[in-house]
């Protein structure tokens, strides 16, 4: 649980850095895509830490608090693709900064949001999520988790 608390602090610091650095970035709107991802990271780790505190005795409440974790993973994690484009453009990578270079990033982001939604969100119910206790941390995970295509392509 301590590790998750540290990750929450680091993600909050990332949110602060994004806000303070906006003046220096040319593609500010794309860098702001980091903010919801960092906020989701804060929420995700806070819920995992709460799972450690609650334990299995509050499984029903933990289930409902965990649903936004899965939604955020499916919808927000692919936004990292757009921040990769923004960072490449800010670094002056050849062709980045043009709409032509932006198109593949945008299409890949949309495809990964669709893939993550199809694989994760359509099976977001009590039948497909199981309570797992590992190393003192209690959290929900997918029972028959499919290969995580969207997170692997995104990263």
Image: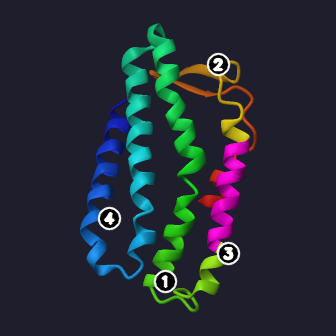
Earlier residue among tags 1 and 4? 4
Q: Residue at x 36, y 19 (%)?
A: 53
Instruction: Find residue 89 and name its label.
Output: 1
The secondary structure type at the circle numbered 2 is: loop
Is 150 on the left or on the right of 95, as rendered?
right
**How far is disc 3 from disc 2 in space, using C-alphas?**
36 Å
Instruction: Find residue 137 and name its label.
Output: none
**How far is disc 1 from disc 3 in space, using C-alphas?**
14 Å
Residue range highlighted in magenta:
105-118
Instruction: Tell me the chief SS of the magenta region.
Output: helix
Q: Quadrant of residue 109?
A: bottom right
Q: Is residue 3 above or below residue 140?
A: below
Earlier residue among tags 1 and 3? 1
Earlier residue among tags 4 and 2? 4
Is 29 on the left or on the right of 59, as rendered?
left
Q: Quadrant of residue 29?
A: bottom left
Give the labeled residue for mark 2.
126
């Amino acid at each position: 649980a301590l590790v998750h608390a540290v990750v929450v602090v680091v993600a909050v610091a990332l949110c602060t850095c994004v806000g303070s650095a906006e003046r220096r970035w040319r593609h500010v709107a794309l860098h702001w895509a980091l903010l919801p991802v960092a906020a989701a990271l804060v929420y995700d780790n806070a819920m995992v830490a709460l799972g450690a505190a609650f334990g299995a005795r509050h499984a029903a409440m933990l289930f409902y608090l965990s649903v936004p974790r899965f939604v955020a993973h499916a919808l927000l994690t692919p936004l990292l693709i757009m921040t990769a484009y923004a960072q490449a453009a800010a670094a002056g990578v050849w062709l980045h900064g043009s709409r032509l270079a932006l198109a593949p990033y945008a299409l890949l982001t949309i495809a990964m949001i669709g893939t993550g939604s199809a694989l994760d969100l359509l099976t977001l119910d009590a039948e497909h999520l199981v309570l797992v206790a590992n190393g003192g941390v209690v959290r929900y995970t997918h029972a028959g988790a499919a290969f995580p295509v969207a997170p692997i392509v995104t990263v």
